[in-house]
Amino acid sequence: MGSLAVSKGIVSVDGEAGGRSVKYGDLLGDKPFNVKFTGTAPQKPVNRYALVGKSVSRVDIPDKVAGKYEHVHHLRVPNMLHGRVVLPRGQRAFGAGARPLSVDESSIKDINAQIVRKGDFIGVVAEQEWMRSRPRGRSR
């Protein structure tokens, strides 16, 4: 009986040419992957590492330099909203202790955006990522 090998999302019997294999997705089907980590699985021997400690060619660089690379922020789906977390002055991360006392909703009345508030969390969502209002007191 051989051991199992995993490569590129496929589990196969190690050393079995053209042998049995299955994809991660086929193992899970439409079920969530809720397996508790126990830390008892044996570690892979260092001599079987495929990428660790090796130089991997950066095939993404030419498209990035040429401006052709598709970043996640280029993704658009129907009815998509863009959001930003609003933090009180001086607070570095949500839940760090500073509680918002009030929210000036009139500050976004000139743009098509909405405030989202749940407990101490405050966010702003809009149809476009870079919504801007015109400066107050000035006409167009």
Image (cartoon, grey):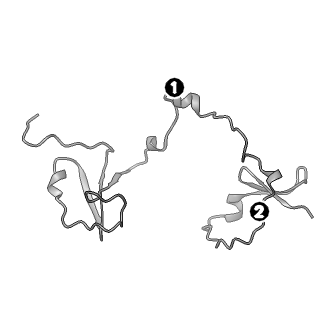
Looking at the image, which is closer to me, 136 or 88?
A: 88
Residue bearing mark 1: 66
Looking at the image, which is closer to me, 24 or 124?
A: 124
Q: From the viewer's perspective, tell me whether residue 25 is left or right of residue 128.
A: right
Residue at screen point 88% across, 54% down: 19
Residue bearing mark 2: 43
User: Which residue type carries mark 2?
Assistant: Gln
Q: Residue 56 at what x, y percent from top left?
A: 69, 38
- Position of 2 relative to 110 (above/below): below
Q: Residue 11 at what x, y percent from top left?
A: 77, 57
Location of the N terminus (image quadrant):
bottom right
Looking at the image, which is closer to me, 76 or 72?
A: 72
User: Which residue type carries mark 1?
Assistant: Ala
Classed neighbour count for the residue bearing mark 2: other residues with Cα under 10 Å, few (<14), some (14–19), many (≥20)? few
Mark 1 vs mark 2: give the one in front: 2
- Which label number is shown at residue 39? none
Q: Which numbered disc, 1 or 2, marks the residue that appears first in the sequence? A: 2
Residue at screen point 8% across, 36% down: 139
Residue at screen point 62% across, 65% down: 30
- Position of 70 relative to 36 (above/below): above
Q: Residue 40 at what x, y percent from top left?
A: 74, 72
Q: From the viewer's perspective, tell me whether residue 80 is left or right of residue 57.
A: left
- Rounded to the nearest angstrom, the CA distance separating label 1 from label 2 is 41 Å
